[in-house]
Image (tube, grey):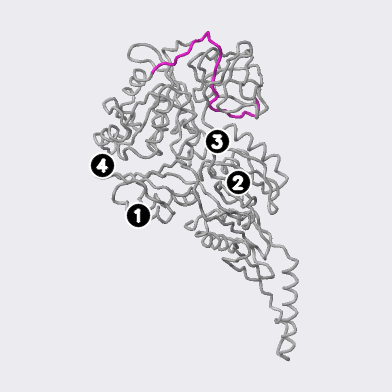
Amino acid sequence: MTDPSLIRNFCIVAHIDHGKSTLADRLIEKAKVIDSRYYHAQMTDNMDIERERGITIKSQAVTIPYTAADGKTYLLNFVDTPGHVDFSYEVSRAIASCEGAILIVDAAQGVESQTLSNMYLALEHNLEILPVINKIDLPAADILGVKHQIEHDLGLDSSIAVPVSAKTGQGVDELFEAIIHRFPPPVGRHDDILRALIFDCHYDPYRGVIIHIRVFTGTIKAGQSIRFMYSETEYKVEETGIFILKLVPGKELAAGDVGYIIAGIKTIQDVRVGDTITGTERTADRPLPGFKEVKPVVFSSIYPVDTNDYEELRDAIDKLCLNDASLTWEKDSSIALGHGFRCGFLGLLHLEVVQERLEREFDQSVIFTAPSVEYHIKLRNGEELSCDNPANYPDEGKIESAEEPYIRASIITPATYLGNIMSLCVEKRGTQTNMQYLDEKRVEIIYEMPLAEVLFDFYDRLKSVSRGYASFDYDLIGFRPTDLVKVDILINGKSVDALSQLAYRGNAYDKARHVCEQLREEITRQQFKIAIQGAIGSQIIARETVNALRKDVLAKCYGGDITRKRKLLEKQKEGKKRMKMVGDVELPQSAFLAVLKTKDN
């Protein structure tokens, strides 16, 4: 049992690409917890997607022993967190299990929007914040300028900021000492009632659900009976241990420890991230203050390519939800695609990552429908309803008014690109509410704009017009009135429900035309013409045609009377007309994926 005064629990937070995972690598390397033969870059990024994209998707807990200058050996439990705004829920879960936070600021880029956002998240949980200036080895590094930003923009004491280079290892020893002296040890007694917070889980096909916990009070060990306070289920602990890049079994976990437990849990629904674990003999009277409830902002339906794989897909989503608590789902069905699931995501990147994980980790072939946000609709009879699925959209005549979600977007950019960014925001129906110069080079602008406008290509276009220098963060601010319409896609006069979209009336024509153009490229030509139409109610607003394959019926006619040729052409025309009436057009999977592409792709 480790003395709590020798334990430090902290997380690493920062804006995207400021060097969190690289710094985590240096901490692991300096502590020598792994043989150098097995060492590689991005040690805390376990998924192929994370390595390929160079981003952190999952928070990863690691325990490392460190012998300090005072001769004592401390146990450092740290969590490497994601930086992208779509994974802020992961960050909030990591923060809830720590006493301190290392806030990394890039020495060349300075304070950016997600830096501010993560700092406020840490302050909400009363964490001690240690600023770290990273990438001091870069030629463009401006340490004095960044210290000024830490004082001016963040309101933190820049004198305690530790300058490091996570790439070369410079300053990491000083950082270890700062962690020990700046972060408080955990409070909580070993002999108290057991209260442990579940901050993550993953599924092992042989051992069941492996639960990641932070013990606040009491002790937990193998053979002990525990209770989940939310689901009120009881299990017997089979194994406890800590994370040193892999699961390392131990005798017990006591107050202040971060580790894992295995209790032979096969029923995935019994485990809920944010739940409190307590003992069955001495039970806690109330749960620990858990995490905030996840509020998905983007909705899309997932369907198996082969309808026989429905049960497999449900199991896969169940297991994925264990590891990704921000994913929500419910059953759904479509005339075109059969049975599936309506899922809620925290953003478009989150949606892409879930799609890749289902395909790679669970070997599922899936189709995603076009993403949508949640709208509030008021009917003429006074009833109010929420609608995120075009299939549930009521008839136009029954609707009195509609509201769509709005966000407050905070963009920090060099002043050079200000004009381009303002034009982009205005194009996306944004209204500027504030603009302030942070210093002579950087400007922060605040826009209020509809969430639906930033779903598809806003982030990519922002990076493009600012050459990668602008940073973007947002939070939801409520619902505002909008002119909402349902855009239906018709193939040969038949509506394809899976391709329907809800859109602002001013953008409906562009959306319908884009979908029709994409489908024209994907649909295989038939013996008859195929009409692809976009419609609002009974009004057609866009059309593309897939031309028919032409069979030359006049090839056998050598000379002779023109009436002979005309008779053959008329006969062919009748046949095509009949074929069009009875023939079905099969939509390939690529057609559904093509609709998700932005115009620039």
Per the image, label 3 sits on a secondary structure element best described as loop
Looking at marks 3 and 4 on the same chain, the residue that comes earlier in the sequence is marked by 3
Local packing at callout 4 (Cα closer than 10 Å; few below 14, some 14-19, many 20+) is: some
- Give the label, 1 or 2, closer to the camera: 2
Q: Which amino acid lies under the numbered mark 4 shown in the image of this protein?
A: Asp
Residue situated furthest bottom in the rendering:
561
Q: Is residue 419 above or below residue 323?
A: below
Q: Point out which mark residue 58 bears.
A: none
Disc 4 target residue: 439
Q: Which amino acid lies under the numbered mark 1 shown in the image of this protein?
A: Asn
Looking at marks 1 and 2 on the same chain, the residue that comes earlier in the sequence is marked by 2
Instruction: Give residue 563's position: percent from left, percent from top.
Output: 73, 89
Residue at the spot 37% in from the left edge and 20% down from the top edge = 183
Disc 1 target residue: 420
Marks 4/2: CA–CA distance: 47 Å
- Give the label, 2 or 3, closer to the camera: 2
Q: Which amino acid lies under the numbered mark 2 shown in the image of this protein?
A: Glu
Most foreground residue, 118 or 247: 118
Instruction: Give residue 137's position: percent from left, percent from top.
Output: 29, 35
Q: Which residues are magenta?
A: 184-206
Q: Which amino acid lies under the numbered mark 3 shown in the image of this protein?
A: Ser
Residue at the spot 62% in from the left edge and 60% down from the top edge = 489
Marks 4/1: CA–CA distance: 19 Å
Most foreground residue, 391 or 57: 391
Local packing at callout 3 (Cα closer than 10 Å; few below 14, some 14-19, many 20+) is: many
Residue situated furthest front in the rendering:
381
Marks 3/1: CA–CA distance: 34 Å
Disc 2 target residue: 384
Q: Is residue 44 above or below residue 457?
A: above
